[in-house]
Amino acid sequence: MPAQHFDKTDLKILATLQRDGRLSNVELAETVALSPSPCLRRLKQLEESGVIRQYVALLEPARLGLGLQAFVRVSLEKRGTTYAKQFSEAVSHWQEVINCFAMTGEMDYLLQVYFEDLEHFSRFVMDKLLQHPGVADVKSSFVLHEVKRSTALPLNHLESILS
Amino acid sequence: MPAQHFDKTDLKILATLQRDGRLSNVELAETVALSPSPCLRRLKQLEESGVIRQYVALLEPARLGLGLQAFVRVSLEKRGTTYAKQFSEAVSHWQEVINCFAMTGEMDYLLQVYFEDLEHFSRFVMDKLLQHPGVADVKSSFVLHEVKRSTALPLNHLESILS
DNA sequence: CCTGAAATACTTTTTCC
DNA sequence: GGAAAAAGTATTTCAGG
């Protein structure tokens, strides 16, 4: 699954949809300087190839009462892969956890989590994380403010590949 | 900007759009068991109130040649707020940086970054991060694999508020 | 591989109940 | 909140360059 062949127009389409995922095909075609039919052809191809994974609405955490964002570093006791599997399974069910990555370094997992307040956070750590079998260590850092928040991946490294 | 008043239908709309941001109003209305007109009324209101921040397409990093994901913890020398402002400004221009948070704890900033490979990563650290005035320390961890990847915020904590 | 045009099908929007 | 009508767009296909 290496990078396929994209031309400039493909990259424009991807860049545009990363900013506004609700554009109609006609609007998209305009912004990438193409007529609707080839634009739609390309779009379908990009969707089917899996480069475009999903279209989503991004919500504002603060407006939903989720005023506290944190990153939690978790390490597990090493007993084969049993704990790891269990932990992955549990994480996928915990709704506070938006993202979870298995990491290199001192900690095994990095969790990105949202909470209403510190009490909510405390319950999460006490009742879920620390109750979970194999969890050896938990360290948390809280987000003071968001300097940059985005979902858009860089694409310009692909521009050099094409003419 | 605390949580406004949402009823069950509002929450269904938000939950649905978090999963599929391209649904038309008619489709959305069907899935939340409402007719199109009140559904559109609610949607517009949710958009204008700012709960819905943006609609985006999510791309697949691996398909774009971005096989290396990392979290970089940065601390700055403490000299008033000058360095902090400069750093925030720089970060917003660095395309490798998807997210940047000012944090509590040992490190001042946590950066989520994507790279083609280790060489690309190395250039970023050497040429950008370490060249930047005031950067005192840089520590990196790499993502081994994604256990959970999402953009959907939890909403069920709001359900208890309503009847 | 793109353009343009034409037909078809939907969606949005509005008004009223 | 629902229904229906009207207007406006989008999608899709096809012929042609």
Image (cartoon, coloured by chain):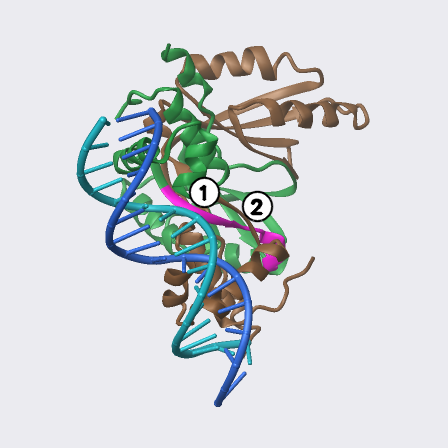
Chain colours: A brown, B green, C cyan, D blue
Span colored in magenta: B54-66
Q: Residue at x 57, y 45 (%)?
A: B70
Q: Looking at the image, do the residues carrying marks 2 and 1 touch, with CB atoms under 8 Å apart?
A: no
User: Given the image, on which type of amino acid does mark 2 rest?
Assistant: Ala
Q: In the displayed structure, does residue A123 sit left or right of residue A84? A: left
On residue B40, the disc is: none
Image quadrant containing the C terminus of chain A: bottom right
Q: What residue does disc 1 label?
A: B23
Viewer-nearest of labels 2 and 1?
A: 1
Q: Position of residue B43 (x, y in %)?
A: 33, 35
User: Given the image, on which type of amino acid does mark 1 rest?
Assistant: Leu
Please determine whether, in this image, residue A69 is positioned above or below residue B162.
Answer: below
Q: Position of residue B1 (x, y in %)?
A: 25, 26
- Distance Cα–Cα, label 2 vs label 1: 33 Å
Q: What residue does disc 2 label?
A: B70
SS of the residue at dot 2? strand
Q: Quadrant of residue B27?
A: top left
Q: Residue at x 47, y 27 (%)?
A: A141
